[in-house]
Image: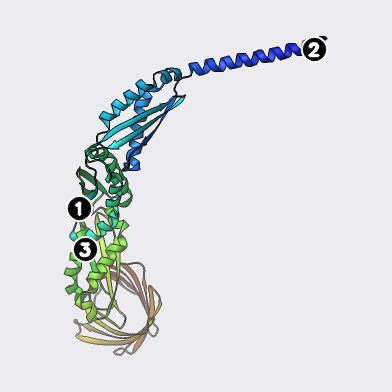
């Protein structure tokens, strides 16, 4: 009997606990407040672009937070119609170009506001883009159009389908799209944007360079296989081709380095001197506030050089001129004749020789002086674009000569010469 009474006691206690918990849940639900608000916007047959809908939803969520957040769910439920009417009236005024057809609130700790809208009046059917590239050379318009890519389509995705009257407030969304796109496509320029609403909406885009700009462009046109004065006729055309770089951002030219090198090569290749001597061209570009563009023109058939020497610190034969005429036998070997004229003694030296290319920057070979009947071995090493080292040895006399040369520009070099018993500074005119 006692066991039965104990069992009845536990059953009654459990039932009482369930009833108390149920009443507590009901009381808690009755006292629950709106903690968050979510929004969804639906449109008719011509819905606005997704980014515009997102902006609408953010705006409605902000108002919904002010109106509903912190209020008891039960109060929202009982005053649902009033809250719906209030939100509808607010957004009928705010969403210019649209009429709010319906607002439906689903109360809860996370309340949901569903809004149905319809456009009124004319809608945007087409976007026309007008681009002002400022002082940018017409020669570079193609490059800029390529960078801009499908920007007109990007703008159209935001504006087409919008009511014309809503373009003013939706324009900020469109401008954000343009600026984000340009930050990825043309990071070296700032964009000024003007939007003129209409069934064909005009977007005026003007670009202004940002960051360090190129103030000067130095063009170097040189050759190691023909006299540099033969290239003078090509210089004006090549310099004109390089002039559009002035005023461009350094970073832009750096990013499009291959394009500008190819542009220079195309112009140089069209010069008559290139075809006349069957020249092969290579180019190098070093962007900066002062930008350097180097163009090398070489022939694979002949090697012709004319140099004048002025030696300072040498006692005799301190001036001379040398003509080097060679013919390449394949890619690595050259047969040549050097003719040297020495004004002080009015003498001529004829020196035939052979050279072999050991690598991209290294040449070596032998010469034979027909006047003194002496042979010599020689080696030339290019250290970089401007520095080179020359070594010569005459076995019969044991005379060694070394020269370290620096190219000041394409027509003038300085060389420091050291022999067994003497040393001097030589100025070399590269004609």
Question: What is the C-alpha distance between the residues marked 2 and 1?
Answer: 96 Å
Which quadrant, please, contains the C terminus? bottom left
Residue beneath the point at 18% across and 58% down = 137
Front in this rendered view, residue 353 or 8:
8
Q: Are marks 3 and 2 in contact (CB under 8 Å)?
A: no
Labelled disc at residue 133 = 1
Q: Please state the total of marks drawn on the protein image.
A: 3
Hey, which quadrant is residue 4 in on the image?
top right
Question: What is the C-alpha distance between the residues marked 3 and 2?
Answer: 107 Å
Above or below, 388 relative to 336: above
Mark 2 element type: helix
Viewer-nearest of discs 3 and 2: 2
Mark 1 element type: loop
Which of the two labelled residues, at mark 2 and mark 1, occupies the earlier sequence position?
2
Q: Residues within 10 Å of mark 3 (few under 14, many from 20)?
A: many
Question: What is the C-alpha distance between the residues marked 1 and 3?
Answer: 18 Å
Q: Residues within 10 Å of mark 2 (few under 14, many from 20)?
A: few
Q: Is residue 79 visible?
A: yes
Labelled disc at residue 261 = none
Residue bearing the label numbered 2: 4
Residue 82 picture location, percent across and down:
35, 20
Residue 96 picture location, percent across and down:
24, 34
Residue 220 picture location, percent across and down:
24, 67
Residue 430 picture location, percent across and down:
23, 74
Mark 3 element type: helix
Q: Residue furthest right?
A: 1
Residue bearing the label numbered 3: 242
Hey, which quadrant is residue 135 in on the image?
bottom left
Residue beneath the point at 29% across and 40% down = 173
Above or below, 324 relative to 210: below
């Amino acid at each position: 009997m006692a066991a039965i009474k104990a069992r009845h006691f536990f059953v009654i206690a459990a039932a009482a606990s369930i009833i108390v918990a149920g009443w507590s849940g009901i009381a808690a639900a009755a006292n629950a407040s709106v903690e968050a608000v979510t929004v969804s916007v639906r449109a008719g047959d011509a819905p606005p672009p997704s980014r515009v809908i997102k902006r609408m939803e953010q705006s409605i969520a902000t108002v919904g937070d002010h109106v509903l957040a912190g209020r008891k769910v039960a109060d929202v439920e009982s005053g649902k119609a009033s809250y719906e009417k209030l939100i509808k009236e607010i957004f009928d005024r705010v969403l210019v170009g649209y009429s709010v057809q319906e607002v439906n609130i689903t109360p809860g700790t996370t309340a949901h506001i569903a809004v149905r809208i319809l456009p009124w009046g004319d809608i945007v059917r087409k976007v026309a883009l007008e681009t002002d590239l400022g002082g940018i050379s017409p020669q570079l318009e193609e490059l800029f159009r390529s960078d801009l890519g499908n920007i007109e389509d990007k703008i159209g995705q935001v504006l087409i389908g919008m009511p014309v009257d809503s373009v003013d407030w939706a324009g900020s969304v469109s401008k954000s799209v343009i600026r984000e796109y340009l930050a990825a496509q043309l990071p070296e320029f700032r964009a000024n944007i003007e939007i003129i609403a209409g069934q064909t909406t005009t977007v005026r885009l003007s670009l202004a360079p940002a960051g360090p700009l190129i103030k000067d462009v130095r063009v170097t046109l040189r050759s190691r296989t023909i006299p540099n004065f033969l290239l003078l006729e090509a210089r004006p055309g090549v310099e004109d081709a390089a002039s559009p770089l002035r005023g461009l951002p350094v970073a832009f030219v750096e990013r499009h380095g291959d394009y500008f090198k190819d542009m220079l090569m195309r112009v140089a290749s069209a010069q008559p001197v290139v075809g006349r001597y069957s020249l092969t061209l290579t180019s190098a570009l070093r962007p900066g506030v002062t930008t350097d563009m180097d163009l090398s023109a070489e022939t694979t058939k002949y090697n012709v050089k004319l140099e004048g020497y002025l030696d300072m610190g040498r006692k005799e034969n301190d001036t001379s001129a040398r003509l080097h005429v060679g013919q390449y036998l394949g890619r690595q070997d050259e047969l040549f004749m050097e003719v040297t004229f020495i004004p002080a003694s009015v003498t001529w030296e004829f020196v035939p020789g052979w050279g072999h290319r050991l690598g991209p920057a290294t040449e070596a070979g032998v010469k034979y002086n027909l006047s003194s009947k002496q042979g010599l071995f020689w080696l030339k090493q290019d250290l970089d674009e401007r520095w080179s080292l020359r070594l010569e040895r005459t076995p019969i006399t044991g005379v060694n000569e070394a020269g370290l040369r620096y190219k000041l520009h394409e027509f003038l070099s300085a060389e420091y010469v050291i022999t067994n018993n003497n040393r001097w500074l030589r100025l070399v005119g590269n004609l």
